[in-house]
Image (spheres, grey):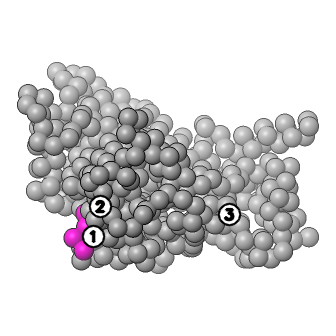
Amino acid sequence: MKKQEELGTRAHHLIDTKFGARELRKLGELELKYLAEVMQGDTLSNYISEQSMTRRFEEAFAKKVGAKKAMAKNSAMAGLVEAVSVSGAGPGYEVVCDPIVHFGGLAAIYFNAVPRFADVRRDTYNMDPDSLLANITPLTKAVILTHMWGQSAEIDTIADICRDKGIFLIEDCAHAINSTWNGRHVGTFGDLGVFSFQEFKHLSTGDGGMTITNNAELFDQMRGAWWFSGESPKFMYVNYRMNEVTAAVGLAQLEKVDGIIETYNKTLAILNDAIAGCEWLKARHVPKQAHMSGYWWSCAWEGDKHGLSYEKFKRIELEMGVGLRFGFNVFPAYEFPFFRESTAYRTHPDCPVRCPFYTAKSNYRYTWGLTPVLEDLMQRLITVNLIFLSIPAAEEMAGMIRKLIKKMEE
Ligand SMILES: Cc1ncc(COP(=O)(O)O)c(C=O)c1O
């Protein structure tokens, strides 16, 4: 028992909140400088002046990712919900989402649209374009595509599919600053790209987000919508705006974000190196077109295919205190009661799947078996949240992983 406690402390030492990429993004002089500028002005509201800190942050962000326009939000979830609204998806329509996270599905249901879940590729964990095609119906209005853990999905293929079929493409880039496909930044392929600045993302403002687009008309429509304080908006809208204090922190953090992501990429490479050559811990495949922005490290357990026991692996890992996490979410998004039991609308629990406006011929239900590849993968994923992992700690962890592999093969 005592041993267990000691090992617990050891794992905690490796994943230390004072170290890693998080250390690099510590609030400091630069944030204070921009905050002072805000305080010396006469408003904390971003829409009073065109010279606002928020405009500076938006312009700097747009420039960084190579987008024509950027609009700061109070969270990525707000950006996704707004994007679904702008897409025109609502009662009677479907939105195809990833099941590995639930954010896209939540945003669709917010507007009473029906999320359909496309399966992922076994080796990249990102949306499989073939499964996307299989999930497109005459009712599909939008796709919400996640670039999971900073690695671009096959965005050129998926953007082509959406363009051909007249479907609105929303890219969830919550984890994906600096992530590119063939040298082009993710978020710029679809109609809108949405980034998160929540506490545990590459760039953090505590809470916050950014929506980018190359479509100036769409941008003006969206910006027009939030000037509604004196009159009613044209369509469903609440306040998704960012304030000036948040923007000041965001602008300062943006200047540090490359160094932060570099640390993530280094720690990710160190852990990948530890499993190189191991036939039963499969590293995530990164297609040659993708330049990824490290976020969570992951690999897939395939020991069962080599006669090894996962239970034994987990037991030895615990004894050694390596600090691996088994799984990420334990089940796909559609297994949450929100989808499965339709708990979103308290007074009309049938909405949106059994909404009278929803005329789909198929009887779409959120049940086990919808995305078999992801369902299997979720039982196999082994992860490490890299945010608190310094480079020396990653090296130490890598050494322990190598020993663990050896012990399993003895
Ligand atoms: C893939 C993804 N999308 C969207 C969100 C929502 O971000 P926010 O907390 O900024 O609303 C998250 C947050 O963890 C996320 O991981």
Percent across and percent down for residue 166 are 21, 70
* Disc on the earlier residue, 2 or 3: 2
Among the 4 quarters of the image, the one containing residue 269: bottom right
Task: Say which of 147 and 169 sits in front.
Answer: 169
Q: Which residues are magenta?
A: 165-170
Image quadrant where one finds the C terminus: bottom right
Residue 219 in the figure: left or right of residue 112: left
Of the numbered discs 3 and 1, the one sitting upstream in the chain is 1
Determine the residue positioned at 36% across, 55% down. Answer: 114
Specify the amino acid type for callout 3: Arg
Is 167 one of the magenta-colored residues? yes
Which of the two marks, 3 or 1, is nearer to us in this view? Answer: 1
Could you say which disc has been placed on residue 359 in the image? 2
Mark 1 vs mark 2: which is more N-terminal? 1
As drawn, is 286 to the left or to the right of 360? right
Q: Quadrant of the N terminus?
A: top right
Query: What residue lies at 18% left-to-right and 23% top-to-bottom?
Result: 43
Which of the two residues, 98 or 117, is positioned nearer the viewer here?
117
In what element is the residue under mark 2? loop
Q: Which residue is labeled 1 in the image?
A: 138
Which residue position holds label 3?
Answer: 380
Q: Is residue 260 visible to the viewer in this orientation of the structure?
A: no
Residue 117 spot, x, y in % from top left: 44, 62
Residue pictured at 44% horizontal, 54% vertical: 175
Q: Secondary structure at mark 1?
A: loop
**Is residue 133 shown left or right of residue 309?**
left
Please rate how many residues cluster around mark 2, counting C-alpha atoms within 10 Å: few if below 14, some from 14 to 19, many from 20: some
**CB of mark 3 within 8 Å of CB of mark 1?**
no
User: Alpha carbon of mark 2 to alpha carbon of mark 3: how far?
Assistant: 37 Å
Q: Say if residue 23 shows up in the picture.
A: yes
| Residue 109 picture location, percent across and down | 36, 48
Classify mark 3: helix, strand or loop.
loop
